[in-house]
Amino acid sequence: MPTRSSKNAMLEPLSEEAAAPVRYLARQPIFDMRGRVYAYELLFRSGPETEFRGSSLDATRTMIDNTVVFGVRMLTGGLPAFVNCTTDALEGKLVEALPPGMAVLEILEDVKPTPKVLSACRRFKKGGYRIALDDFTWQPEMEPLIGLADYIKIDFRSTDAEARRQTLARLSNFSGALIAEKVESHQEYEQARREGFTLFQGYFFCKPFLITRRKVPANHVAHMQLLQAMQQQPLDLQRVCELVKRDASLTYRVIRLANSAIMASRQEVTSIKSAIVKIGDDQFRRIAWLAIASEFNAGRPEEILRMAFIRARFCELGSIGTNFEPSQAYLLGLFSMLPAMLQLPMEDAIRELSLSEPLRTALLRDDRPCSSEQCSIQARLAWLKSHERGDWPESDSIAAQHGLDNSRLLADFTEAVVWADRIIAASA
């Protein structure tokens, strides 16, 4: 598996200069009714708080300059970016560092609709920004902000069905989009749809909701066999070619991705064998893993695949000096999303795979604690899962317990996000 310095990597990683400026940033997807990512909420931290703040203006401005202006389009793939805003951030014009047209100013629930706040919001709207009201509960004094809002977010964790019904009745004339946030199960997602929400935020999309099957679907058997074959060093060329050719869509994906990987040389490959010979075993493995993961994820939100490759690249980047080879660390991150892809418990999803014992143990262990000597890569993966949720205290606790460098973790996370977005785009 190529590492950070590999010259024949499918896609060039971010330079250290590009990766370094991003600090304390996570992103959470917001989905539309078709399961497509509509936007990302960007979660910033300039200190122990989780929100975008106007206090400590110098530090916050530096953070915004180095992260949002530098990388908001890169970090959202050009999709809208929801950014939490306090009263100070609005009144102090700090949000003007965010790009109009892409930024959605998410006004926190404790912001009061004072004349100064309303004036600022009207000015931002005229400048091309959109407005969202976060953790919304009905209060008469909020009507002026409702009139300016493009989105209203309602928390499924802190409201019940009756409270939401009353709130939605009050919003019957609201012409913007309703976002159900903190939707953590498929049942809550279906409930939100019935209630009239059209956008959804939470981790319902990556949790299995159909676990009655006890076998990997038949159309994935050849994929599982190919995954096993790719564990061999070196590759059995004849065996791998036969397995890939059993699946026409997989063959197409592999050939197309192989050509994408060598497009600079303008020497097209037209067969599985020529692809392996041209780009080498390690690069072929990476391309085949992408193709297989795409097949596993068919019919599921693309964000699952994106998260899988963010985790894979993130684990790979941190594998040096650990008990995992880079390729095994890559698979740990990738396979951590198998339950969401296949809608199976992890033990069933990997039952047919011939995995190394450390990898199998790590996948089955999930987030249960382990000693730092045995599982520094597992600790990185646990850190990333907490980071995905914006759970900064848990992330910090994991980093401290396992001696992980936060600056390195954040730089690797940013590189992994951009790298994953690029290869997802290449496989589309």
Image: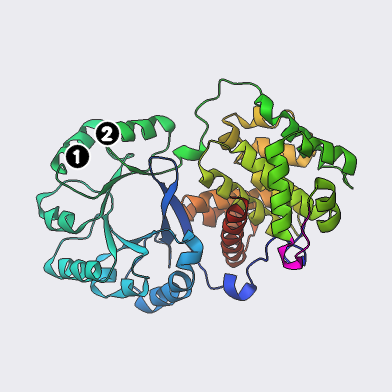
Quarter-of-image position of residue 149: bottom left
Q: Amino acid at mark 1?
A: Leu
Give the magenta-colored segment's residue range. Answer: 262-269
Mark with earlier residue (1, 2):
1
In 3D space, how far apart are the residues under numbered discs 1 and 2 (Cα atoms)? 8 Å
Q: Tell me: residue 259, above or below residue 246.
A: below
**Residue 256, percent across and down?**
69, 51
Contact (Cβ within 8 Å) of mark 1 with mark 2: yes
Disc 2 residue type?
Answer: Glu
287 shown above or below 89 = above
* Residue 236 in view of the camera: no
Assign the N terminus to one quadrant of the image: bottom right
Measured as percent of width and height from the top left, residue 58 is found at 38, 79
Q: Quadrant of residue 369?
A: top right
* Image point (80%, 53%), residue name: 282
Q: Is residue 121 magenta?
A: no
Label the magenta part by its dominant secondary structure: loop
Q: Residues within 10 Å of mark 1 (few under 14, many from 20)?
A: some
Q: Secondary structure at mark 2?
A: helix
Residue with the mark numbered 1: 168
On screen, residue 71 above or below 195 = below
Q: Evaluate whether residue 67 shows in this view.
A: yes
Q: Which residue is mark 2?
A: 195
Q: Nearer the viewer, residue 68 or 278?
A: 278
Residue shown at the point (37%, 64%) measured from the top left: 102
Q: Is residue 139 left or right of 330 when viewed as pictured?
A: left
Residue 155 is left or right of residue 123, and the answer is: right
Task: Name the spot of residue 250 as percent of width and height, x first.
Answer: 70, 40
Asked if residue 266 is among those painted magenta in the image, a careful observer would answer yes
